[in-house]
Structure formats: C-alpha cells, structure tokens
Amino acid sequence: MNEERYQGKGVFGAIAIGRVSIFKRSEVTVKRERIEDLDQELARLEEAKSKSIQQIQNIYEKAVKEVGETNAQIFEIHMMMIEDDDYNDSIHNIMETQMVNAEYAVALTADNFAEMFQAMDDGYMQARAADVRDISNRIIQNLTNCGQRAEASGEKMIICADDLAPSETVLLDKEQVLAFVTELGSSNSHTAILARNMNIPAVIGVGAGFVQNIHDGDTMIVDGFTGEIFVNPGEETCRKYRSRQAEDERRKSLLQELKGKENVTLDGKRVNIYANIGGIENIGAVLVNDAGGIGLFRSEFLYLEKTDFPTEDEQFAAYKKVLESMAGKKVIIRTLDIGADKQADYFQLKKEENPAMGLRAIRICLTRPEIFKTQLRALYRASIYGSLGIMFPMATSVSEVERILDICGEVKKELEAEEIEYSREIELGIMIETPASAVISDRLAPLVDFFSIGTNDLTQYTLACDRQNAELEEFCDPHHEAILRLIELAAENAHKHGAWIGICGELAADTSLTETFLRMGIDELSVSPAFVLNLRDAVRKLDLSK
Ligand code: PEP
Ligand code: MG
C-alpha cells in the first residue's frame, strides 16, 4: 500500500501512531421494507433489543464507577424503557399489520412516542422524548449493525470523522481514543478545545473527502504539531515519527521538573496559572500538571453528556467533587454556556439563522430562570467544600449583570430560608468575551470580583469571524491589535475598581503573548491542563524589568 500524506491544522501538539477507526454517526437512515417472514423479523428485533440492553448495562456500570449511582440512574431508566409494554406493543403492531421491517417499526414508534411526550404539560415527561429517541436509535443501530465503533475493541484508535459536534466528542470513550482527525473544523471550535483538554493529538480541517479515502484499520501517523497526516506510512516515515515521538516525550518529561515551582518571572512578578476543564474526568490532569486552580470549568458539558437536564443533586455532586479534589485551591465554574455549536436536544432551542449571535449562554439562563436557578443552587450548596468562583458567560450590559446578581441574591435567600449552608466567600465574575463588555468594563468592574477574558469568542465577535468556519482562519487573527487593546482596557478597568482579571480563552496558552499579558497586569492565565507547565516555563524565563 502506498503512503499518502494529508495536511490539516494541528490543534494539540503531540504525535500518535496507530490504527484508524472511522467515526460512524448514530443516526442511520431507516428504509421501509416489506417482509415475508414475521417470526424471523421478530427474532431479529429481540436479538437487537437484548444487545442494546447489554450495552446500556455496561455503560451503566461504568457510569456508576465514574459519576456515582444517582447520576447513572438514567441508564437504568433506558433499560426499562426498552422493556416497556406500550413501546413494544406499538413496534409489534406496526410490523404485523404492515408486514414491515423492524428498523422501520422502531423508528416510527420512536417518532410517535417522542411527539406524544413532547405534547405533555409536564417538563419531566417532555424530556423523555429524547430518551425514547436515544434507545430507539441504539436498537436500530444494532439491527443494522451500524454505529459500532471500532474503539470498543479495547485498542486505542485514531478517530477520523467528517466533523465532530461537541456532544459527540464528549460521548467518546476517552480511554479508547489515541487521536482525532477531522475533515472540517476550526482551531477555536469546541471540538478542538476538547481535544486539548483530553490531552491527545488532534488535527482538524484535513479537507472534504479525506474520510472516503481511508479505511477502518489503516495505519496512520498524526502529527498534532504540524497538522500532517500519513496514511499507511512507509518504514522510513514510521522510524522518523517514532523518534520524534520519543523526543517529544523527553521534552515533556523535562517540564515535569517544574512541578511544585512558582510561576514567577526573573524579576519577581507572579501570575496564577490555572487549568480549563470540561468535566470531573479532567481533574486528574489538573492535579498531575500542578495547576494552581481551575480557571474555567465549562459546566455545559455536564448538560451535553445527558439526555435530560441534570438535576440539582447531580450537579451538586459534580461541583462538590471538583471543589474537594482541588483541596482549597480556587475553582471557577462557569454557568451554562449552551447554544451555538453546543446543542442538547432536550433544551428544544429553536433553529437560528446566526446561532453564535443567538439565544445562547447567559441569554438562555435569563430567559429560562428555572434552569439557571437549579444550577446556582447546586453551586451555592457545593461552595462549602472549597474555594468557589462563579462566572457568567456572554454578559454584554450592566443591566444583565444586575439581573444575574439579583437572581444570585434570590437563590441565597431561598437557601437561607431552607437553612441550607453556603459559603459567604464565593467570588462572582463575568467573562469578557464580547467587545461590548470590554468597552464598558469600567461600568462592569464595580459589580463583580473578577473578569475572565474569553478570547475565543472575543476574537469571533470583534473581528466578525465565525469561530466554527475553517475558511476564515486567515482573517481570524487573535493577535489583532483590536483584541489586545480590548484586553488591556478590561485589565485597566478591572484594577481601577479592585477586581482581578484572568484570561481563559485559548490565547492564554500562547507563550508568544505571555510577556504582553503580564505587562498588561493580567493576574491569571487559565489553559488546558497539558499546557500548564509549558506556560510556567515561559513565565520563569521572562524578565519584565528590561
Ligand atoms: C472563550 O470564548 O474564549 C471561552 C473561554 O469560552 P468558550 O471557548 O467555551 O466559548
Ligand atoms: Mg466563549
């Protein structure tokens, strides 16, 4: 087989050598087909159902270990739904009366049941629509033998896909993924950010048609530094990349010597280096890389992992765990930032022309305060287990921040009335990720304890460049003077009003800007866990007195 080379954009610097697993979407197209032998078709259905139950049982057991029994309960519900009499009667009925294939009967039943649930008044029952679709998709996949990912084999694989939505990425079994390669995608997309958080080599934007040219099981080299991909590499290339891999590992192990050392420049300026995480499964990486705290916990991934709103108790358990694990170090949890590219069906958000500028993040929380309050209650309750900061995404005006603070006040009052404890030391902050908030940062700073600059969105909104659009990368320069001036303005205004300021967007890890940020007076830089020691290294080599 001839070696083939492709070029994309590296989003996490590391090298992977392994075998390909092509990502198969869970949605399969279901065709209506006439059948001759009903008994045979019913037996096929039964087999797919037992396989589905077995798979869910395995997921349930894994979830109990990772997130506890309460959080895992949804999978028990899924198993019960597969056995539900009404659901099964409907499938059998359609098959018998129309003499059609099981896939079709399951898909039609899923549609009917989901519509029925959605039409109910009760929010709990409405949310069951997503569950019935989920279990039905699994049965259909098992019927068609589609959607079985090669990573189930136990071997770590290189996942290749046309594109991966954040909700798809978050559901991949991290233990089984060696690297990511996608045809589409941009460096600031959440999928790229997740790859960085997962600490695995990732190359995106390899170009349309790439996946069609490769096969499951092909050998592949992924160079996350240069964005190069080699399919079925020759011996010479393999040798070269094995030696680069070893060199990279040597460099990373040298950085380990910086553990326990301070983030201080040669002339004595200190900065906090914190880590960004997407869920409790990243806490290990934060501790291993010796981050001083967590500067951004993207709480929306708790919602994306699920088929229904996480309950107050489920969220409380996750926040408590992260606070306890960080043992008194600062943990900044960002409230729900759903919408745009981060979609969960059960929110039933309307399709929008411009979702990045649509009903997302704090706008959802302010229009659906019951969702917001559930999260805030969980956060306040968890606050007694460590040093909590709460920050709010996408705020653009004084009145929005005032409304947010009012709702926090209401939540505190409710907890007090219920005699539920919460910490009085919680810091409240906002993300500066719109030009509006940077420009009026003098008005916002007196209202909060801290600012955290989200350079990913600040770049997209300031330069009018959709961060999801790979075609725009050349126009989307986060070093643009406009971005740097907005950051500087926010830093000046924060300090003038006694607030501190950090950066938690991807730019915080860009060591070519570390000196600029420190000269601006940035107090904290929050980066993917794997970048913490590299950034510490850069800080320790700087001399700001010159
Ligand atoms: C940002 O916009 O820079 C940020 C940190 O938030 P997210 O990437 O999750 O939108
Ligand atoms: Mg953002």
Image (spheres, grey):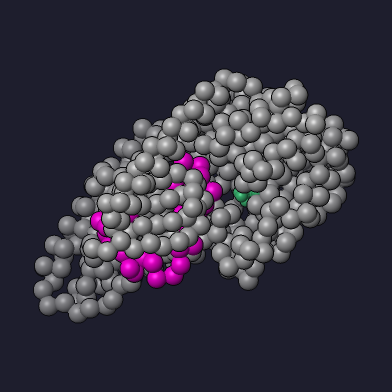
Instruction: Tell whether 114 sits left or right of 335.
Output: left
Q: Quadrant of residue 529?
A: top right
Horizontal and vertical percent position of residue 214? 31, 64
Horizontal and vertical percent position of residue 479? 71, 52
Callout count: 0
196 in the magenta segment: yes
Residue 90 in view, yes or no: no
Where the C terminus falls, by quadrant? top right
Front one among 532 and 351:
532
Front one among 229 and 141:
229
Instruction: Tell whether 409 sits left or right of 197.
Output: right
Horizontal and vertical percent position of residue 224? 46, 49
Residue 480 in view, yes or no: yes
Residue at coordinates 45% horizontally, 44% vertically from top-left? 14
146 in the magenta segment: no
Where the N terminus falls, by quadrant? bottom left
Q: Quadrant of residue 392?
A: top right
Horizontal and vertical percent position of residue 121? 53, 59
Residue at coordinates 11% horizontally, 73% vertically from top-left? 37
Residue at coordinates 64% horizontally, 57% vertically from top-left? 360
Instruction: Tell whether 458 sits left or right of 470.
Output: right
Q: What residue range appears in magenta?
A: 191-220
Vertical relation: 323 (above or below) 407: above
Front one among 409 and 298:
298
Residue at coordinates 36% horizontally, 41% vertically from top-left? 243
